[in-house]
Image (cartoon, helix red, strand yellow):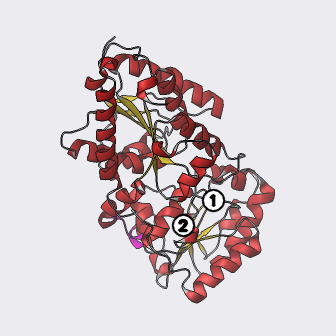
Amino acid sequence: MTLSTLTAPPFSIAPSAAPVICIVGARPNYMKVAPIIKAFAAHNPPIPTLLVHTGQHYDPAMKDRLFADLDLPEPDVNLAVGSGSHAVQTAEVMKRFEPVIDQHGARAVLVVGDVNSTLACALVASKRHIPVVHVESGLRSYDRRMPEEINRILTDQLSDVLYTTERSAHDNLAREGIPDERAVFVGNVMIDSLRASLPKAVPAAELLAAAGLDGSRIANGYGVVTLHRPSNVDSADTLGPIIDALREVSQALPLIVALHPRTRNNLERFGMLDRLDGDGFLILPPQGYLEMLGLMSGARLVLTDSGGIQEETTALGVPCVTIRENTERPITVEQGTNTLVGIAPEAIVAAARTILATGGKAGRIPEYWDGHTAERIAAHLYDWLDAQASAEPQAAKV
């Protein structure tokens, strides 16, 4: 889809005067949008933006904390969608986002990642004949049981400009029939946030002291654990063996667990919360961005099922054990510090033991994970929008 094939947009604000609407919805989005907003403002000339928070991540305290940590301005619009099933949440975002376009217009709608808000806003924009810009395109786990995989595939099909974090993403897009000229390799914008924020990261010892935990327990090193994916934590038959594996690892290395509410609730429901008792575990509530950076940067290893943490540990040079059967970020395994082990307890324990014995994979920083991705996006998108406006001068007319 290109602007030359589109009819005039159904709103009265001229596209050239309208903003690029940038969407955030859930926690992973913030780290991706923050540097983009800054790069758009710093571009010469600046690219006008409207920041829309869908409210998919609906914890006000955590939202405010993340915005402050990342120096992200308060959103211009908050849709306050809140929780719900995938269908309900997606539908609510669509219903509440369309009036924003009616009020403000949109030169383009920029979405990031793979959450429900990403797909919902892309759908609305596409049906309103507004260009869709997708940051972090082309990542595939090839596991359609993951809701995020469905969101990725559909958003990429709807998008006019697809910015990729790794070159293998272009092969994925080509297999799905997306023309190569729509995809642009720019690097990983989340690493922009990491590099900018690392000097402000909160050390692990400081976090433990604030939580009333004994920091001397990590004097000889520690690991970090995050678990939240439904496929890992919603079934006692899966979660129990994973916790048992972590207990075994904790006998060799203290593990700091940033316990996700979903995981805590399920551990309580399954009667397993006491399995995290003992000297090997230090349990913290969910942490802010600067706190997690501090935990990860000082760790000897990280055990996780998070996609973003696979990338962050590669950028930090910290060994990562990914407790999943697949990953949509293969570059972290092929070039970085990540080891994909599945969910079998013996595999988790074996990988951790290897890292403790050898120091783990050294890895290297992938191409364009250099802290300047947002600048490349701003430069390309400005030129792309300018070219579209020149090619279709009547598009600004009602």
Using the image, determine if residue 42 lies above or below residue 344.
above
Q: Is disc 2 placed on a helix, strand or loop?
A: helix
Magenta stretch contains residue 203 = yes
Q: Nearer the viewer, residue 126 or 34?
A: 126
Q: Is residue 189 toward the left or the right of residue 151 in the image?
A: left
Using the image, determine if residue 197 lies above or below residue 235.
below
Q: Nearer the viewer, residue 362 or 203?
A: 362
Q: Give the magenta-colored segment's residue range.
A: 201-206
Q: Residue at x 54, y 85 (%)?
A: 359
Residue where numbered disc 2 is placed: 332
Residue where numbered disc 1 is placed: 327
* Residue 210 in sight here: no
Using the image, determine if residue 118 lies above or below residue 3.
below
* Residue 78 in sight here: yes
Q: Neighbour class for label 1 at 10 Å: few (<14), some, many (≥20)?
A: many
Which amino acid type is shown beneath numbered disc 1? Thr
Is disc 2 in contact with disc 1, using a CB cutoff of under 8 Å? yes
Q: Residue at x 50, y 36 (%)?
A: 159
Query: Residue 273 placed where, x, y %?
Result: 69, 60
Q: Residue at x 70, y 64 (%)?
A: 274
Q: Of marks 2 and 1, which one's residue comes earlier in the chain?
A: 1
Query: Residue 328 placed where, x, y %?
Result: 60, 56
Query: Residue 244 placed where, x, y %?
Result: 74, 70
Distance in Å between CA atoms under marks 2 and 1: 9 Å
Which amino acid type is shown beneath numbered disc 2? Thr
Q: For residue 294, what is the image quadrant?
A: bottom left
